[in-house]
Image: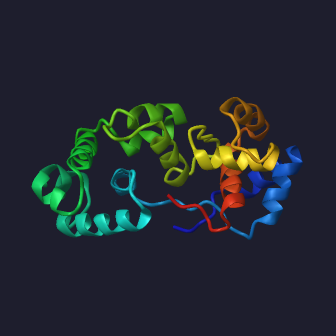
Amino acid sequence: MNAKPAYWDEACGALAEADAVMAGLIAACAPGHLVSRGDPFQTLARSIVGQQISVKAAQSVWDRFAAAAGHVQPGRITRMRITTMRACGLSARKAEYLKDLAGHFVRGEVDPGRWPEQSDEEVIAELIQVRGIGRWTAEMFLIFNLLRPDVFPLDDVGLLRGIGLAYGRGEKAARHEAVTIGETWRPWRTVATWYLWRSLDPLPVEY
């Protein structure tokens, strides 16, 4: 589970060679790398549970939800009562989102078996059909679950802050500035993003 992505060392070398600032960020970080976050359904369900609440609160709600479900898997969640889910601390909207997510998996509308053959944009298009999953959540999934190497989440505040601090005047970068700078990092923008996050917080980013 903690294996380094096969492309990681190659990506770091290419980024450092192409971009002196990125080379400095990579050199300044303690050893570490992106780690997959496990089961696709549970990862997406956790992302819904954690929306707009603290990490601590999200973990508490998740623990109660997982205990009530017994097994957090699509077929089980489609059969849970909304009242049971609400009793775990979920809002009515999040309970509905989790039901919708489970239904998409059960019906095969979201199918992890297809993803190895799909592009990033095709996976994103599939995921955002689920209520409660927008582009940012789908991009985080591509990074932290599928370990896709060239994801560039322009809606992520941490990424824009990191670019602004490393390449700008210390202010959050504008999206168009980030796009321009990010062109240098293709096809390894996931790795560059991870190091920019690390430059803001030395603890490895997890989602």
Residue 149 image point, x, y percent: 63, 46
Place of residue 195 in the rendered image (x, y in percent of width and height, measured from the top left): 71, 56
**Residue sitting at x 59%, y 61%:** 205
Say how the picture is coloured.
rainbow
Q: Is residue 4 above or below residue 139?
A: below
Residue 119 in sight: no
Q: Please state the horizontal and vertical placement of residue 35, each as a whole percent of the image.
A: 56, 62
Residue 16 in picture, x, y percent from top left = 84, 51
Q: Nearer the viewer, residue 52 or 76?
A: 52
The front one of 169 and 139 is 169
Counting labels gives 0
Q: Decide if residue 74 is in sight here.
A: yes
Q: Is residue 22 left or right of residue 75?
A: right
Q: Is residue 91 left or right of residue 169?
A: left
Q: Nearer the viewer, residue 99 or 165?
A: 165
With respect to residue 100, does 30 lie above or below?
A: below
Q: Left of 136 or right of it: where is 18?
A: right
Kindly indicate the quadrant of the structure image that contains residue 194.
bottom right
Determine the residue positioned at 71% across, 36% down. 178
Which residue appears at 55% of the width and 49% of the height?
143
Q: Write down the quadrant of residue 107 in the picture.
A: top left
Q: In the image, what residue occupies the spot 59% across and 41% down?
A: 153
Looking at the image, which is closer to me, 135 or 147? 135
